[in-house]
Image: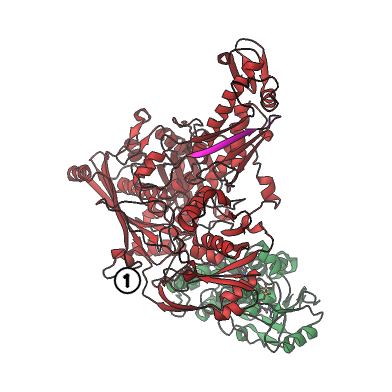
Amino acid sequence: MQNFEFHRPKTIAEAVAALKSSDGDGKLLAGGQSLIPVLKHELAMPSALISLADIGGLDEIRLDGDNLAIGAKCTHAQVASSDVVKNTIGALAKLAGHIGDPQVRNRGTLGGSVAHADPAADYPAAVLGLGATIKTDRRAIAADDFFTGFFETPLESDEIVTAVLFPKAEKAAYAKFASPASKYAIVGVFVAKTGGGVRVAVTGAGPKVFRVTEMETALASNFSSDAIKDIAVSADDLNSDVEAGAEYRAHLVGVMARRAVDAANG
Amino acid sequence: MGSIGQPLKRKEDHRFLTGRGKYTDDIVRPNQAYAYFVRSPYAHAKINGIDKAEAEKADGVVAIFTGADLEGIGGVPCGWQIHNKDGTPMAEPPHPALCTDKALFVGDEVAIVIAETKAQAKAAAQLVMVDYEPLPAVSSIKAAIAEGAPLVHADAANNRCFDWHLGEKDPVDAAFAKADHVVEMDVVNNRLVPNAMEPRSAICEYDPSSDMTTLWTTSQNPHLIRLLLGAFVLQIPEHKLRVIAPDVGGGFGSKIYLYAEETVVTWAARKLARPVKWTAERTESFQADAHGRDQIGHARLALDKDGNFLGLHIKNKANMGAYLSTFAPAVPTYLHGTLFAGVYKTPAIYVEVEAVFTNTAPVDAYRGAGRPEATYQLERLVDKAAAQLGMDKIELRRKNMIPKEAFPYQTPVALQYDTGDFIACLDLGLKSADWDGFEARREEAKKRGKLRGIGISTYLEACGIAPSALVGQLGARAGLYESATIRVHPTGSVTVFTGTHSHGQGHETAFAQIVADHFGVDFEAVDIQHGDTSQTAFGMGTYGSRSLAVGGSAIVKAADKVVAKGKKIAAHLLEASEADIEFEDGKFTVKGTDRSKTFGEVALTAYVPHNYPIEEVEPGLEETAFYDPKNFTYPGGCHICELEVDPETGMIEVCNITVADDVGRVINPMIVEGQIHGGVAQGVGQALYEGCIYDDDGQLLTGSYMNYTMPRAADLPMMTVGNHVTPCTHNPVGAKGVGEVGSIGVTPAVINAVVDALSPLGVKDIEMPATPQRVWAAIRAAQG
Ligand SMILES: Cc1cc2nc3c(=O)[nH]c(=O)nc-3n(C[C@H](O)[C@H](O)[C@H](O)COP(=O)(O)OP(=O)(O)OC[C@H]3O[C@@H](n4cnc5c(N)ncnc54)[C@H](O)[C@@H]3O)c2cc1C
């Protein structure tokens, strides 16, 4: 790990200023569960780390009309155990409760997870699957516009995620096939029926989280696992590694989607 | 009464659980510097030059050394020499401690950078410019033996290390000629990374005023390290080289060997006259700890029409990696070929093993070492035979087992079993696992959409290594006895110095139980010391489940000497004849009287010899004994695994594991059970999770926990552990050994269970590790 400057701003404005003054070479530090491993392996060598620890108001969970607003600094453990989350989008609480291990869940945050946009992370499936909105210090970005590529988002180098707004769901469930080694998703499928329609979002399988529109259409007319049992996902653009080849992943997308639909139907 | 047989809590755990263990990386010496190794990023490369000028200018750099600087010191030696079928010795290419002209695997040590801080050493290492010329590599056994394969070592033709055999071929050929059935199969024993929780570490300090070199290192056998390093590499006489292996956080074999890193650290600390410390990062552990297993083979079993085994022919190939690690050649040979009788009375066995070099990390003993490979091959073959002949797999085993009346039993592959009761273990296992009730459980699982399977392995292993004369004939370059010194203090408390080394096995507890009972003193009054060559008599260390059987026996011998001397002293004090003194429950008593002296009184007299038979015995009460075993010991038993497969995803859940073992006499049942739990976890790991993969270019694809799957607590069920004891007949403890039974016995039971679960779908075999993707692929292939 290379040396870096360490800042601990008290406000978002100070944090933005610190990011600006580091010429795009500074990094926000939230729970550190993705960033610290990156630094240890020297995959990134930022000149400064700007900690969000002292910035207030980013760790609230509240109902905001038809949306559930979760602050960027909320840890996975907080989301997993929140009654508000459990009562409005139970699937989200469950998803958070199965990320990594207890240490990771007690440190890692929602904001860090979406900003990092790891193609095997769990939250992106919920964000895209529910059609959520990512709020930053300067704008609101729709989920469909947010996950643009492999570890890639439209966030600017000095932009800070402040919250994610999740629409309430009539039905929702997440089915994850975890890597036996890392416990990240080899394939995770989030299925939801909200005021905005039916969505099926897949994480782990491709270079970024993506939707399966064919399944969405089928489920819109018949929200049952039977409706999608013959829909095959092409292996063409899927990931292949020592744990799972593309064909296996394509197969698992079908299995996990059906399981998610069954779970969503209770 | 007595403490033997009691599940006493482990003495050592208090310091481990409260963070007070003292590991090598915790050792801090004044003015110490830190080392970081420059490692080859290529599996095979010519080194055209090394430019260290930039690196030498970096902050804090003390020195940088390359292979050229080490000229004149010996290479890292191999401790076992195997002979080929034709009697010629194996190929034994040199292993320079730092690469000279070529790097032979990813992670090979190319240079050492020593700096004031660890961060500085690491930063400077990135500035060492090595001019590599990448060469074609061989990263698997198959690639190594292919026509025209690139050579790992110029002087090892066809990449062959040795071509070895054991047993007689003619009787085996005759058995096949008259067989009614022949069952054959190919088996792969996957490559494993040992993954001790504590990474390897070494710190060496040289004191020019006394010319003394002290090396603290993560070792299972400090004396062996001293011998190899002192006598073979650096030419330091033993009395000037002290090796200390303090608390060590797991070894599983990987910390037996002398490694390049500790060798170079020692050399550099002497050269600089400054302490030098190195601790591996986890990535380095993956790359450069000696790996385990990695064998492929073909097995053929001849049977008569009733299912009696007539003959067995094994033809295997083993991967040695790029260099010969300390015990590597012994693993696929004498720790492997000798195991093919297993628990069966197969009359004719012939084993052929060819070992090859590849551009991968060296491969050596890993928990079980050779015996898991043999057991897996044999127990898969027996299951396949049952299926092929349409016989019940239990009855086929039972019918071929060596009956308990047959001991001592001479196998066709060198070993002579002293004792055992395989059928009793089998019956105990079947009963504890409710084998007969399994079909109902299978049906119930089916209703939940799961395929449930049950698998068994009945196995035997050879440990307690080993009679020195015998292993000498087999190629060992060392003896395999063990030492013990018992120092009875004036007030009757006791310190025991053992040549074994505890790195998780609980010696401080189990050995204390033996001594406490032997002397009739309190368990708390006995302390076990190990790991420092300046304190203990020359001992061979801990591996091959030998510590209790061999080290414990040395302790008993030393304790007997203490008692013998005590009798002389007591006889004097009691004015009786020595022949009339009996020792029991801590008291020396004149036979048939109530006149006695306690152990403590006798000890005090030995150190305050005012009224003392000084003409006859010396003062003091301290004895040393060496014990050389008469035979190997033969633990064995029956492991049963029940699991469920999710046929849609291929995911396996292990539901229960039943162990019915005979590990000989049990000193501490809790420690025995703990050893079995740990071994079983690693055995399940080999079967279902762990697989070390190099790509065709020799790059390590599974170099971290992101994709190398270790078994975790949540992956394992509660285990039922039963014991059917037949004490070892030839050592004074009666113990056989327990450290490796789990990783030897359970692996085939798990795979037999997977195949059993999948057999309704037509799956006949599956390669380890049986990952979800492999299971899914096997189902797909079977269903066409
Ligand atoms: C052992 C282990 C297992 C894991 N398993 C899983 C798993 O199963 N599933 C899963 O989804 N994840 C898993 N993770 C990742 C974990 O969920 C991380 O917590 C998460 O990905 C990042 O959150 P963080 O708060 O730790 O962010 P950090 O690591 O602090 O930051 C990550 C990135 O986001 C940026 N960032 C952080 N906060 C903000 C913000 N508010 N605005 C803009 N940018 C920001 C940082 O600059 C950095 O680039 C695992 C991690 C570990 C160590």
Q: Is residue B483 magenta?
A: yes
Q: Residues within 10 Å of mark 1 (few under 14, many from 20)?
A: many
Secondary structure mostly seen in the magenta stretch: strand
Single out the residue that lies furthest toward the front: B209
The residues colored magenta run B482-490
Label 1 CB, ligand 1: below 8 Å? Answer: no
Q: Quadrant of ligand 1?
A: bottom right
Question: Is A165 rendered above or below residue B670?
Answer: below
Single out the residue that lies furthest toward the top: B592
Which SS class for mark 1?
Answer: loop
Question: Is B719 rendered above or below residue B578?
Answer: below
- Looking at the picture, how far across and down is residue A260, in whole percent? 56, 68
In the rendered view, does A24 fall on the left or right side of B36?
A: right
Residue positioned 32% across, 45% down in the render: B386
Q: How many marks?
A: 1
In which quadrant is the C terminus of chain A drawn? bottom right
What hue represents chain A? green
* Circle 1 residue: B150
> Closer to the camera, A240 or B634?
B634
- Looking at the picture, how far across and down is residue B307, in whole percent? 27, 40
In the rendered view, does B332 fall on the left or right side of A185?
A: left
> Closer to the camera, B778 or A158?
A158
> Closer to the camera, A139 or B101?
B101
